[in-house]
Amino acid sequence: MSALDFGYMWSLVPILLSYVPLTLFMALVGMAFALVLASAMAVERVFRVPVLDHFVRLFISFFRGTPLLVQLFLFYYGLPQVLSFMSGINGVSATIMGLTLHFSAYMAESIRAAIMGVDRSQWEAAQAVGMTQGQMMRQIILPQAARVAAPTLVNYFIDMIKGTSLAFTLGVTELMGATQKEAAGSFLYFEAFLVVAAIYWIMVEALAFGQRHLEVYLNKAHAR
């Protein structure tokens, strides 16, 4: 068994770190869009708007029931064949679209559960003072639901960061794609993938650390 080439591994670190911004960019943009879409679907699932509710349930079922990789291929390779305006889509855009739709389906159910977990007295008090449904959701219900859903949403963001590793299958040279190229050039696959695993691990642990502190802060704020 040959020894690990630590010199190569160390030289690889700055190369791979230069691709971290693209990985985080895709995850952050995907998370921002997913939050908006998931919140809208969660509110719809609470009020069950006729006709629209069937579409939302179908959307959630499809994107939760099919693999993210299949969805990425569908957006990047499939949609341009049937929708001419999608012909110019690039790998980064397809990845962001896939992450947004895939994770919004999961996040919608988490946000819906958080909304339904808000004490009914809060709903009744808002209605008693004459608030519209929109005002009630914006000013009373959603802020309280956000506190409950926040830790779970951070977990989804962590999964989204790891999900960006599939972008290399669409030709995107992000963190995983760069590792593939470096490993193919050096034939030191174990060392290369060990380094990228460590980088992903550090990013995830940093977010998990922030998540723990966020939970403590939110619980203290709620206790006051």
Image: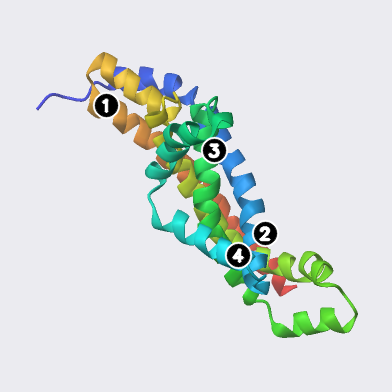
Q: Which colour scheme is used?
A: rainbow
Mark 1: which amino acid? Glu
Query: Would you say the residues marked 3 and 2 are in contact, meaning their CB atoms lie under 8 Å apart?
Result: no
Residue drawn at x 51%, y 52% is 103
Point out the frontmost of discs 1 and 4.
4
Q: Earlier in the sequence, mark 4 or mark 3?
A: 3
- Residue 114 is situated, as x and y percent measured from the top left of the image, at 61, 70
- Residue 96's label in the rendered image is 3
Residue that carries the numbered disc 2 in the rendered image: 40
Mark 3: which amino acid? Ile
Point out the frontmost of discs 4 and 3.
3
Label 2 crowding class (10 Å Cα cut-off): few <14, some 14-19, many 20+?
some
Q: Which of marks 2 and 4 is nearer the N terminus?
A: 2
Residue drawn at x 39%, y 23% is 178
Residue that carries the numbered disc 1 in the rendered image: 191
Q: Is residue 92 above or below residue 149?
A: above
Farthest residue in the right direction?
129
Q: Earlier in the sequence, mark 1 or mark 2?
A: 2
Residue drawn at x 24%, y 25% is 189
Tell me the distance, in whole angstroms, between the alpha carbons under discs 1 and 2. 44 Å
- Residue 111's label in the rendered image is 4
Which quadrant of the view contains residue 180?
top left
Position of 221 compared to 5: left or right? right
Q: Which of marks 3 and 2 is nearer the N terminus?
A: 2
